[in-house]
Amino acid sequence: MLTRLTRPSHTTNRDGERGQIVVLFTMVLMVLVAVAGMLLDGGMASGTRRQAQAAADTAALAAAKAAATGGDGTAAARAIAATNGFPTSTPNCSGEAITGVTVSNPPTTGPSAGIVGFVEVTVQRPMRTGFSGLVGQSCWMVSARAVAAVSNSAVAPCNFCSLNDTSSNHTLVLKNGATLRVDGDIYVNSSSGGYTPGTCTLSSWKVCGDGFDVFGTGGYISAKTISAHGGWETHDLNIATADGLATFNGAPCTEHPQPPSQTQTANVCIHVPIMADPLNDSSKPGNIVYAPAAGSRPVAGLNGCPSGATSGTGTASSAALLTLSSGTPTICPGTYYGGIKISNSASVTMLAGVYVIVGGGFQVINSASVDGSSGVMIYNASGSGEAVSTTAGTDLVPAALPGYGTPGGVALAQDHASTAVGAPVIYTMTVDKSKSVGIAPSGTVDFYDGNSLVCGAVPLANAGTTKRTAECTQTYTIWGTRAIAAVYSGDTLYNAIGDTVTHTVSTPAGTNIAPFTILTTGSVRLTGPKSGTYSGLTIFQERSSNLTITLQPGSSAVACPSGFMTADISGGTGNDWKSGCGAIGGLKGTVYAAHDDALVYITASGLAPLQVIAGMIQVDSDADARFAFSAAYFANGRIHLTE
C-alpha cells in the first residue's frame, strides 16, 4: 500500500500576514493622505493669508488717502477690499453673516489704538478646505489687519512750508497785491517778532512781528490753517485769515491774537514749535529723501531711450549745456552734465523718470513749452559729493575685547595718478604685527566711503615678514571731498582697528549749480513721479544751494473758471484741483529747496495741487494763486502703512 507524503500547509498563516500588511498599508496611506491634504490646505491658507494681507494693506492706504482729502475712508476701504476678494459682508464657517471689512478710525487695537491720525482695516473671509475636512477641519477663517497714517500732518505737514528759522524778517511774503489761497496748511518758521509764549505786541495790522507779510492793495492770504513760529503782519488793509486753528498734540493752538485793525477773524497761530524739514527730518529717518546720484548721460537708442530722442551732450569729465530752441524734441531721464536750456519756440516732451541736472541749471524761457506730465523729478545740483567723516575707533570699529592684542601699526594710504572724475584710486590698508604678540595679523579689511561699505571683507595679503595689506580700488563720477575709512576685522590674536583718509575729486568746468528757471509764455506741465523713491517730488534743489527757483509758466491747457479762488473745489469734475487751471495748473507735486536762503518765487496765477517746501517763498506781481491739498501728488509717500 502506497502512502503519499505531504508537506504541512501554511496557507492560513500567510493569508493572515497578508491581511495585516494590507491593513497597515491602508492606515499608513490614510495618514499620508491626511498629512498631504493638510499640507495642501495649509499652502492654500498661506496663499489666502497673503491675499488677505495685500487686501488689508491696499484698503488701509485707500482709507487713509480718502480721509486725508476729505473723503469717506470707510467706503474707499470697502470698495478696494471687494475688488481684492474680500466683500463687506461674508459668511463665517457656520454660514452666519459677519462683517468682512472693518474700518476703525482711529484704530481700536495695536500701538496706534485710539490715536487720531491713523486708520485700521481688518479683512476676513472663510476658506473651505479639502482634505482637512477628513479630520473635522472643513473650514478655516482667514483674516489680516493693516494700519495706515491718515491725518493731514501724516500726509504732508503743510502745503506751504517756509523752513528758514534764523531770519528776523518775513520768509513768506506776498507783494504787489498778490492773493494766495491754500486749501491746506501754511507753516512759517521765521522767528521775527520773538517766539516767547505770552509775549506779543499788537499794533494796527501787526501781530508781534512779520514772519509772513502781505503788501499791495487787494492782497490777502488765507488757508485751512496758518501757523507762525514768530509773528506776522499785513499792509495796505490786507487780510490774513485761516478757516480754523491748527492743532498741536491733539488740541487747538493757544495763542492766536487778533490784529486790532482787522475785522475778519484771523485764526493765525503764533509761537508754535519750529517745524523740521519734512523731507529731511533726522528724527524720522524714514522721511528723509536722499538726493539721486549722478550717473550716465542719456543716449538715444540705449537703456530705454527711444532712438528718435535727443541725447544729452555733456559727460562727467566734459560738461556741456543741452540747448533745445526749436521743433518738438523728446528727452529721456538721466544725468545732464552742464544743464538743460529750453528756449524760443521749442516744445519739449520729457519722458517719465528722474532728471539729474549737474551744473548749468534748468531753464524754460521765451515761448518754449514743456510736457513732463508723465511723471518726472528734476534734481538741480552741482554734482559735488559730500563726505560723511568717520573716525577710527568710533562708529565703524568694534569695541576692543580683553585678552586680545593691538596691531603694532595701522595706516590707510591712497594712490592716484589724477584727481579727475573717472580716475581710479587705490586705497591700501597696512596692518603690522605687535611685538608683544609676535605673529603677523590675519583676517580681512572693510573699506567705507563715509558710512557706506564699498569693499567688503578684503583678505590681508603678505607684504613682508611683519606687515599685511589689503587694497580697494574706486572710481568716482561725483566730485568733491569724501572720507574713506578702512576697518581691520581682527583675528584670534588681535583686536579690530581702523584708519581714515580723505580724497578729493576735482570739480570739472561747467558744473557749478545754476538757477532753476521757468519764465515762459508757453505751457509748462510737470508732474512728480506717480510711484517710487521720488513719488510726488517734482522739483528738488540741492540742499546746500541758496539759489532761487522761479516759477512763471505761461498758458495752461485748462482755463480757470470765474470765482475759482473762492469756489468749492473739493470734488466734482472739470475745472477742479484734480486737473488744475491757469498757468500754474500745469505744475503738480512738490517743489523743494531746503536751504535757509533758497527762495521759491511764484509770479503766475492759477489753481494747482502744488506743495512748496523752501527756505523762503514769495508770491508776486498781482498773482492770484490757489494751491489745493492733494496727498496723491505730494512728496515722500506720506500716506503709508505703519502696522
Image: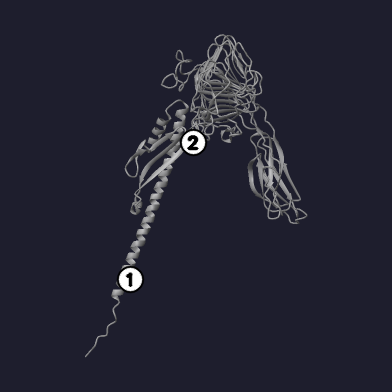
Q: For mark 1, what is the residue?
A: 17
Residue extending farthest bottom? 1
**How dense is the environment of label 1, judged by Cα within 10 Å: few (below 14), some, or many (20 and up)?**
few
Which callout, 1 or 2, points at the residue further toward the start of the chain?
1
- Amino acid type assigned to the residue bearing label 1 in the image: Glu
Q: Position of residue 510 (x, y in %)?
A: 66, 27
For residue 85, side relative to residue 198 (left or right): left
- Amino acid type assigned to the residue bearing label 2 in the image: Ala
Q: Is residue 610 placed above or below 443 in the rendered structure?
A: above
Instruction: Measure the C-alpha gap from mark 1 to mark 2.
Output: 66 Å
Q: Secondary structure at mark 2?
A: loop
Residue 365 visible somewhere in the drawing: no
Q: Say how many tags the image has.
A: 2
| Foreground residue among 474 and 159 | 159
Q: Quadrant of the N terminus?
A: bottom left
Q: Position of residue 625 (x, y in %)?
A: 52, 16
| Foreground residue among 227 and 372 | 227
Q: For mark 2, what is the residue?
A: 113
For residue 434, side relative to residue 47 (left or right): right
Q: Position of residue 568 (x, y in %)?
A: 44, 18
Q: Secondary structure at mark 1?
A: helix
The mark lying in front, picked from 1 and 2, is 2
Q: Identify the residue at horizontal 42%, vertical 34% (top origin).
A: 103
Label placed on residue 303:
none
